[in-house]
């Protein structure tokens, strides 16, 4: 995060989604590191497709 904007992102872990997490990483890059901005951005992403059984609110807590 530089000057409040996500400039680089790497997500790793043991999760069982079918999507390529690189797509989520790319979506996060350029987003302001602000809870409301991240919530807005996550509205466009099917979090369960990428990470398995996790709610968007839980994912948001992990990254914010």
Image (cartoon, grey):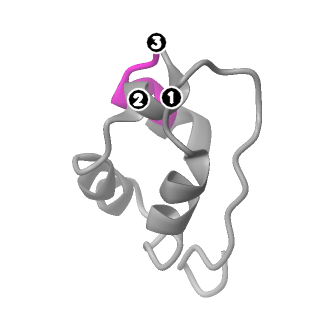
Rounded to the nearest whole Å, what is the CA distance between mark 3 and mark 2? 9 Å
Horizontal and vertical percent position of residue 43? 22, 46
Looking at the rendering, which quadrant does residue 31 occupy?
A: bottom left
C-beta proximity under 8 Å, tags 2 and 1: yes
Q: Mark 2 points at which residue?
A: 49
Query: What is the spatial separation of the Cα atoms under label 3 and label 1, in whole angstroms?
Result: 11 Å
Query: Which residue range is magenta in the image?
Result: 53-59
Which residue was labeled with disc 3?
Answer: 53
- Mark 3 and mark 1 lie on one chain; the one further toward the N terminus is 1
Q: Dot 1 surroundings within 10 Å: few (below 14), some, or many (20 or more)?
A: few
Classify mark 3: helix, strand or loop: loop
- SS for callout 1: loop
On screen, residue 25 above or below 50: below
Classify 10 Å Cα crowding around label 3: few (below 14), some (14-19), many (20 and above).
few
Task: Give residue 32's position: percent from left, percent from top.
Answer: 44, 73
Is residue 57 located in the magenta-colored stretch of the structure? yes
Query: Which residue does the image show at 50% across and 18% down from the upper left?
Result: 52
Q: Which residue is most to the top?
A: 53
Residue 5 percent location from the top left of the image: 53, 79
Between marks 3 and 2 in the image, the one whose residue lies nearer the viewer: 2
Residue 60: x %, y % from top left: 46, 39
Residue at 68 percent of width and 73 percent of height: 8
Which residue is located at x 60 percent, y 87 percent? 3
Q: Which of marks 2 and 1 is nearer the N terminus?
A: 1
Label 3 with label 1: CB-CB less than 8 Å:
no
Q: Verify whether residue 38 appears in magenta.
A: no
Q: Name the residue under label 1.
A: 18
């Amino acid at each position: 995060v530089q000057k409040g904007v996500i400039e680089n992102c790497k997500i790793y872990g043991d999760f069982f989604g079918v999507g390529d997490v690189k797509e989520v990483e790319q979506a996060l890059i350029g987003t302001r590191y602000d809870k409301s901005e991240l919530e807005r951005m996550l509205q466009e992403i099917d979090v369960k497709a990428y990470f398995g059984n996790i709610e968007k609110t839980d994912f948001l807590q992990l990254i914010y």
